[in-house]
Each structure stands twice: as C-alpha cells, then as structure tokens.
Image (tube, helix red, strand yellow):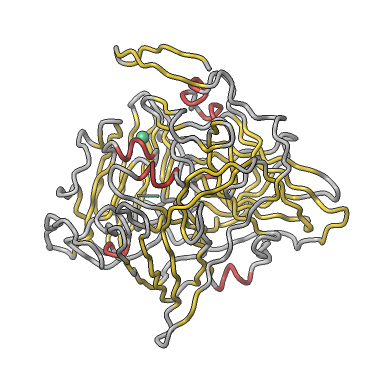
Amino acid sequence: VTVVVLTIGGLFTWLWTGADVSTAGRVDFDEKLAIPPLAKSSVDKDGTRVFDLRMRAGTTEFKDGVKTPTWGFNGSYLGPTLRAARDERVRVRIRNDLAEASTVHWHGMHLPARMDGGPHQMIAPGAAWSPHWTVDQPAATLWYHPHPHGSTARHVARGLAGLFLVDDKESGRLPLPKRYGVDDLPLVVQDVRFDGAKLDTGRGFLQNVGFLGDRTMVNGTLNPYQEVHDTHIRLRLLNASTARTYAFGFPDGRAFSLIATDGGLLERPTSMERVRLSPGERAEIVVRMRAGERVTLRSFPPDDYGDAWQRRFSGGDDTFDVLELRAADRLRPSPRLPAVLGRLEIPDGEEGAVRGRHFDLKRSGINGREMAMGRVDETVTRGTTEVWTVRNGNGMPHNFHVHDVQFRVLEVDGEKPPPALRGPKDTVFLPDGTTMRLALRFDGPADPETPYMYHCHLLYHEDEGMMGQFVVVEKGQRARIPAPHPTHA
Ligand code: C2O
Ligand code: CU
C-alpha cells in the first residue's frame, strides 16, 4: 500500500491506493460464471406481467468459505434478470426487507415519473411498492438499482443491482445470438476489493472520485470463466461499478461488433476493438470464437480516450482481466450478423427542437447548485424535443445520465460523435474538457409534481449533490414543488 500526497486545488488529499492494480495475466479463471436467473413472472387477469422483488440483507461467500454481509434482490447478492416485451404491461411488487429505506429505479426505462423509483419514491423498511407501466421502447439491456438520495453508492456497492431486458418483435426476428446464458451472456461488471476473503467496501475510497476496486467481478463471480459452444457470442455488458470506467476489448486485438448501446440496437453492427463504459452505461457486442480457444475479455486503461485521472490514481496500470471465454472443441456455426439491425427511435437531429439548455458539471453540483429534493431545476414541455449542452471543465471525470429518455448524441466537442455514441444513449461519459450536445425528446405523460433526475452516475458524486430534477408538464402548465412523498405501504 502506498500513500500518495497530491495537491488538488490547493488542498492536500491523502490517497491510499494499491501501487498497481493491474490483474492482467494474474486471474486464474477457475470459477464458473454465475448467470443471473431470469425472474419468474405471472400474467394476471388483465394481462399484466407481474414480478416479485424482495430487497434483503444476507451473506455471500465470495471465496474460501468466508461470508461477507451483502444485500440482494431475492438472493443475497445482485438480482434476477427481469424480462418483458414491448407493449407489455408490467408490475413489479417490491418489498423492502432491509433495515433502512431505499428505492428501486429502472435505469433507461421510459415510464411515468411516479413509477421511476427515484429518490422521491422511497420504500420504508418493511413496506412494499408496486410500480406498473407499459413497456414502450425498443429492445434493450436496461438495469435496476436503488436511488435513495445520499446513499445510492452504498446501496449499489452492497449488491443491489440487476438487469431488465426489453424484447421486441423486430429484434426477435433478427439472426442475433439470443439464447440467454448460452450465446447471449449478461455481464454485470463491478470492481471490488477484498480484505482476505471478505468483500471490503471501506478501503479504496479516493477523494473526488469515489470507490475504486483493485479487481473485477462479473455477476458476483470473482474469477469467472464461461464455456461457449457457438461461433458468435453476444455479451451484454453493464458497468455496475460505482466510479470506475472500463475500456473493454481483447488482448489479441481482435475486433468485435458493437450491436447495441444503452437504449437498444444500432442501425448496423459496427466493428471495433475497444468499447468504453463509464458507470451505468451498457453495450452489447458480438465476439467471434474459434473452436478450442480461450479468449480473455479485458478492460484496458481508458486513458487512450483522454481519461488519465483514474489511471493516475490506480498507481500506473489499471488493466483488468474480466472473464475467460472457453470455446468448445466443436462450435455450432452462428448465422451471419445482419447488415441492418433496425431503425433508431431517438430524435433525428436538432430540427424541431424547441429549446436548448446548458448543464455545467462540477463535483459540487450541476449549474452551480447542489441537488435539493424540494427544488425543480428544469421544466420541460411534453411532446417536445430539446438540445442539451453538457460541459465538463471540472478537472476530473464525470458522466451524465438522464432519466426517462433515450437521447441522441449530436456532437462531441463540435465533431460528429464516434460510432459507439451513435445509438440510443441514456448515460454519456465526459472526460475533463469535454462538451457534448444531446437531442432529447420528452413524450411521456406529464406530471407537474413528480420530478425525474439527471445526474452524474459516478455514484459518490451523485450522492454528494451532482444531481438535478426536471418535470414534464403540459404546455402552459407549471411545475409544483414536490411534497415529500409518503411511505408506500
Ligand atoms: Cu442509474 Cu438516476 O440512475
Ligand atoms: Cu461526477
């Protein structure tokens, strides 16, 4: 352990970090990857698909027969994968069996503000909450996690996170790998630290950034390998870490096809060698396998994209060996990837945009304000498209997530966005010095009393107040300051 003293803005900050957190070539890959179970559901009389989630405390054995207290949905760590189709009505009956209040937010989902599970929809210990909505968006890899104001990082790091997959008819007809857990693998990636065999969420906390681990875990499995039997393997990558940004690729430099971003499929598969994901972002990639080979999914230091910050604090090298794919000696040939995947449902451009807004990202708050539950920061008219300009000039990395919508990235520093930012997005990474212009369309129901959030998804920043609230109203309607919400019973 080294002690590094740094001067940041005239302040001395003490940082305790592992000298070199690279795990490249050092992971045994001797544990079979856990695949989160698909959540059971039932369909009630009016055709609603009903899921049950229980937030609970438990213990998890990550290694060597030692148990760590953790939290999970239905189990002791992470949660099952919820899955529903477009146009389906869903209801999730949630029970909070934790000893403290929390929420469940549907990250990336287009739904009424009262069902969003943000900090205004707290569920008291022992209480229940049953949000319901009609799935009204294209096929995508979404996720769910708590969002209690000030405690989100802690609740997520203890294990409260899961996937929500949306299906639709168009994507169902495409020849893409789609056998869950076979050639379509959900990968919930987190960075963690251990104290012996115990998960340690205390150390590794870095001033101004938040918690950074010194190794990675996938779906709660520490040294994961997965046997595969097909020539095309689809990986649904979720960065469920609280602070760390990854740049996923393969040590042999092989290219893969990016097929989807946060909110669903791209127009066409795009070949690339690295995909960068900051906290909260998702990507779906298709990897081509050869019979009998072993291929490591690696995260490279993301600083070739301009983020030297995290690497500096990792003491040099933050390369992580994340997962080993073991190809069987005989592989089933997968169909060729389609040339065209679908039509994007995000705004075309800025044509028709009714107004612009600016968001200046600072660790101390957005646009100079710290998050306040009782203040509405932005009021948006239902049915309109807007252009939001987001700037990070704060000397450290931030990202920007907007609830309820999937947006289009129009420009990054005045240029056309790179291929990985051309699909539907709900979260974008902004290294220091970046400006992005986003086109967002707000077409959900108006609710002048219930805000949605926008925030930095580096959860420590969010908890410290890098968050703001917007409401969607009918034309001419005014937002009302949200009253503190009663506990859902
Ligand atoms: Cu993933 Cu406001 O959250
Ligand atoms: Cu931030």
Q: Residue 19: which quarter of the image?
A: top right
In the depicted view, which residue is nearer to us: 476 or 361?
361
Q: Nearer the viewer, residue 448 or 267?
A: 448
Return the x and y of residue 355 as percentages of the image width and height.
Answer: 24, 50
Residue 27: percent from the left, percent from the top?
A: 70, 34
Q: Residue at x 33, y 26 (%)?
A: 394
In the image, residue 467 above or below residue 46: above
Relative image position of residue 139 (x, y in whole percent): 52, 64
Q: In the image, is residue 259 above or below residue 366?
A: below
**Where is 445 relative to 272, above or below?**
below
User: Going by the picture, which residue comes out furthest to the right?
Assistant: 329
Q: Position of residue 180 (x, y in %)?
A: 64, 63
Q: Is residue 396 left or right of residue 252?
A: left
Question: Going 43% across and 84% down the picture, which residue do you hit?
Answer: 44
Q: As drawn, is 172 to the left or to the right of 97?
A: right
Residue at the (41%, 33%) spot, across then down? 413
Total numbered labels: 0
- Image quadrant assignment for residue 144: bottom left
The furthest residue to the bottom:
45
- Split into 4 quadrants, where in the image is the C terminus? bottom left
Q: Is residue 322 left or right of residue 312?
A: right
Q: What residue do we see at 42% from left, 19% from top?
A: 15
